[in-house]
Image (cartoon, grey):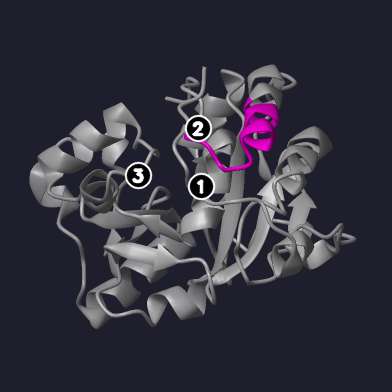
Amino acid sequence: MFAARRIVSFHGGAAGRIFARVVPNERTMTPDDPCAAVPPALWHAVPLHYAPHLFATGALFSKNRLKAAGLPIQPRSSAWRRDTRLGLSGYVHLSLSPRTPLLADKRRKGYPHLLIAFDAAAVFALPGTALLPFNTKAWRHRDDFAPVTNADEKTALLEARRAGRHPSLEVLVPGALALAPHVRALHAASEAEADWLRAFARVVPYPAELPLFTSPGLFAPGPAPDLSAHADYQCACRAAGVLLAPPDLPFD
């Protein structure tokens, strides 16, 4: 069922502390202030079954980088086609809000996802970071999807969003975005999903402390996730003693 592709061996050490049970507080459990021109956090959602490989590689990769590296994580097929058509497949996409229509759709379909909150100031300081006025799913004209890199134009776009325009505005990071030191926290929609991730803590040799919260308020309503295939995957990894290629589960 699972390809025996060796990714990383099980081990103890610092990785076992990644997913310590942290008592949530108001700052980490609530969305960022929608009135702020630049929220303190930027957000990215990943399918839950891809999370162990994300921690093993320590970075988010653009769709081009994923394909070139031959990683066992596949981009969403619909997003891959749109980004390629629009010339945006070389960027990592982040949103300014955790509650996006895309994630709400995945939740309604019962596809478990993990939210990653990045420090906005740190991301905006990276070279080449750009803004996109609209989510690519809403594309009508290619000219609307040229990355905005000019500092004054980016400021104007952020101010326009604060005024109620461009609600689906995205932040683009070229190439790849390392988790450390840019991640503020991880958020799961349920304790069952968080516990599944914690069980991989000794598998992934990721050195940073990444607090993991159960934050249902950040997610749209959805059915209780069926984690039976996720549990089978975890058992297969433990039996093999290595992190295997993720199962082929629907997420798009």
Residue 9: image location, x then y, percent: 59, 51
Q: Label 2, secondary structure: give it.
A: loop
Q: Earlier in the sequence, mark 2 or mark 3?
A: 3
Q: Which of marks 2 and 1 is nearer the N terminus?
A: 1
Q: Which amino acid does label 2 sit on?
A: Pro
Question: Does 244 appear in magenta?
Answer: yes
What label does residue 71 carry, if any? 3
Q: Do the residues labelled 2 and 1 touch (CB within 8 Å)?
A: yes
Residue 194: image location, x then y, percent: 76, 43
Question: Does 106 appear in magenta?
Answer: no
What is the C-alpha distance between the residues marked 1 and 3? 9 Å
Q: How crowded is mark 1: few (under 14 residues within 10 Å), some or many (20 or more)?
A: many
Q: Main secondary structure of the magenta part?
A: helix
User: Quick check: 155 left or right of 110?
Assistant: left
Q: Do the residues labelled 1 and 3 touch (CB within 8 Å)?
A: yes
Q: How crowded is mark 2: few (under 14 residues within 10 Å), some or many (20 or more)?
A: many
The residue shown at (63%, 62%) is 32
